[in-house]
Image (spheres, grey):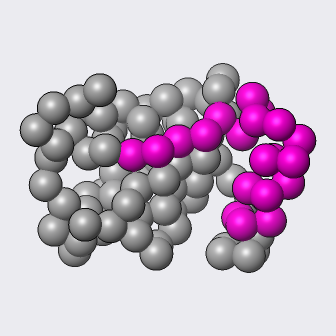
Amino acid sequence: MAKVSIYTISTCPMCRKTKEYFRSRGIPFDFIDFDLASESEQNKIASEMMKGTGDIGFPFVRIGDVVVIGFNPERFEQLLKSENFEPATSQA
């Protein structure tokens, strides 16, 4: 199963909606609030974002090797189906 990783801004409403989208479907994910991360971590994240997409935007969602910038539930659903994601049996 492909991994879901999300970079967010702690005060961003669309970032909160994105995390809720995955939680409500039982899809496990890792996330980092960019604005609360250390400067060195922010630099690393920004570099990764630019390398992968040439852009910095939030939420930044990686599903497997595919990046989606912004809250885009239709695209999330498409990618999750293509990766054969199954909801987690329990949530933390």
Position of 10 relative to 27 (above/below): above
Q: Indicate the quadrant where residue 51 lies.
A: bottom right
| Magenta residues, start to end | 29-49
Percent x, y of residue 72: 42, 53
Quadrant for the N terminus in the image: bottom left
38 sits to left or right of 60: right
Percent x, y of residue 68: 50, 63
> Among all residues in the image, which is located at the extreme right?
39
Q: Taken as a whole, is the magenta stretch helix, strand or loop?
A: helix
18 sits to left or right of 28: right
Q: Please say whether residue 38 is one of the residues in the magenta stretch.
A: yes
Residue at 43% of width from left, 40% of height from top? 18
Residue at 52% of width from left, 48% of height from top? 6
Percent x, y of residue 62: 49, 62
42 sits to left or right of 34: right
Position of 32 relative to 73 (above/below): above
Residue at 40% of width from left, 70% of height from top? 64
Percent x, y of residue 91: 23, 30
Position of 33 relative to 40 (above/below): above
Q: Indicate the quadrant where residue 55 lies.
A: bottom right
89 sits to left or right of 1: left
Q: Please say whether residue 46 is one of the residues in the magenta stretch.
A: yes
- The answer to whether residue 78 is seen in the rendering is no
Residue at 30% of width from left, 34% of height from top? 23
Q: Which of the two residues, 74 or 68, is positioned nearer the viewer here?
A: 68
- The answer to whether residue 38 is seen in the rendering is yes
Count how many numbered circles sit on residues in the image: 0
Quadrant for the C terminus in the image: top left
